Amino acid sequence: MQIAFDNSYARLPERFFRPLAPTPVRAPALIKVNADLAAELGLDADWLESPEGVAMLAGNHVPQGAAPLAQAYAGHQFGGWVPQLGDGRAVLLGEVIGTDGTRRDIQLKGSGPTPFSRRGDGRAWLGPVLREYVVSEAMHALGIPTTRALAAVATGEEVHRERVRPGAVLTRVARSHIRVGTFQYFAARGDEKALRTLTDHVIARHYPEAETPLDLLSAVVAAQARLIARWMGVGFIHGVMNTDNMSVAGETIDYGPCAFMDAYHPDMVFSSIDQFGRYAFRKQPEIAVWNLAQFATALLPIMGLAHKEAVEVATRVIEGFADLFATAWEEVYAAKLGLSRMGEPEASLAYDLLLRMAKGQADFTRVFRALSGADPTTARTEFSDPALLDDWLPRWRARVGQNGPESARIARMQAANPAFIARNHRVEEAIAAAVDGDYAPFERLVRVLAHPFDDQPEARDLALAPRPEEVVRQTFCGT
């Protein structure tokens, strides 16, 4: 098959990347191809499943027209500055323009060492590959901007982490893999020419309505405000919101120790490497602001203004995140609660519910789905003390009753409140089974999570909160 690559990033100056091919693996074996995504990209899923296609997905064959490279970037990791990071275990094969006219990267993750590997092996083990496949596709089905998974391939090789693990490669698709840290990389080197080139590239690729670096900053701030509000609406915790993990395209990227909350608490942390809760659930908006401030700092030299004036105008743009996020959050929670608007009384009602959910250790997803049903009082059973909801329900019913017939409320709320999320214990079960050679739980998760707002009675077990012995308290990066 001929893939119609059009590799705009590879046409940038070579200091933006290091050209190299992926490292071949011993015995590639297909785990899964995402046929729907393949069709969007204009690729033949049957060919991807063929020996030649699997060889490409594993990194054993570089197709004609590809321009494989590892991207350079820097970043703040848990607040600490690292001047050079880059793709340490990933190779960008190239870009394609899909059937919808959107340009997307095709990247192999776990494809071997690169000049940016920092003594790492450049590989991925099966667990993180399956986790990213499941969670990124679940996020897409929830309507949240995200990178996506085109395929997963086993390598037939062992990967050494805390113990020996089976290796795998994920084929990841993104509108781009350009990060806040990409801009920081050149700003730290005083390379204003590269900053201008990168800015022009991102504007042309993602924000054609922007004309200046300040316009770009405004567009990225708005995109991130909308994205983080969507995360907060499904109980998603990214887990490692470093500046090198923030996409300027406004997509969720780099699913490492990510998780969806079961029992709600605003200070929830799952990531094993987030020892001080820097990236806790409630802190995600403020961390987004911190990251965006680093983006603004990187852009200051090319804003065409005196330094003091550039700082002032960039600061105003960053400070605007709060209002943008509040508006997006209100839209998300108005839909979740079946409200047509979110004024001060409605917002107070929403915050009050979240406080009660935290006190009552109530399951985030199941409470909102229960409220979406014909008998919202069933939400009481999700609380350790059901009485916590008793005086809230009539106040909510009075508000929601002003918004049309009951059938319309149910339809509206069920379209905003998923029945199914990628629950941590189910993802871990699927990984454990796959390590033993059984991919049926993984396949079932992917199939059910593709339709998260449908009831799917045959999959009712996947909508249940974990039993105490099933609760996953930590998630891991896998590098």
Image (tube, grey):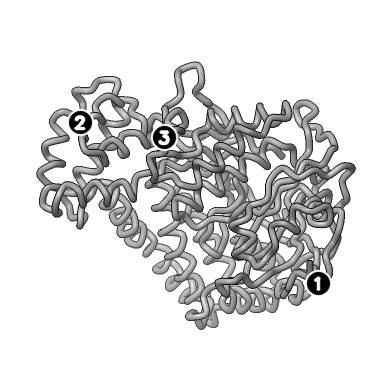
Residue labelled with disc 3: 267
Is disc 3 placed on a helix, strand or loop? Answer: loop
Estimate the spatial distance between the alpha carbons at disc 1 and disc 3, rounded to whole Å. 47 Å
Mark 1: give few (<14), some (14-19) or many (20+) Cα within 10 Å. Answer: some
Q: Are discs 3 and 2 less than 8 Å apart at CB?
A: no
Q: Write the residue at 63% across / 33% down.
A: 440
Q: Nearer the viewer, residue 402 or 350?
A: 402
Q: Closer to the camera, 444 or 220?
A: 444
Which is nearer the N-term, disc 1 or disc 3?
1
Which label was assigned to residue 377? 2
Q: Are marks 1 and 3 in contact (CB under 8 Å)?
A: no
Residue that badge 1 annotates = 65
228 versus 424 height, above or below: below
3 or 2: mark nearer the eye: 2
- Which tag, 2 or 1, sits closer to the chain's start? 1
Kindly report the distance in space between the C-alpha atoms of the residues bearing marks 2 and 1: 58 Å
Question: 234 or 55: nearer the eye?
Answer: 55
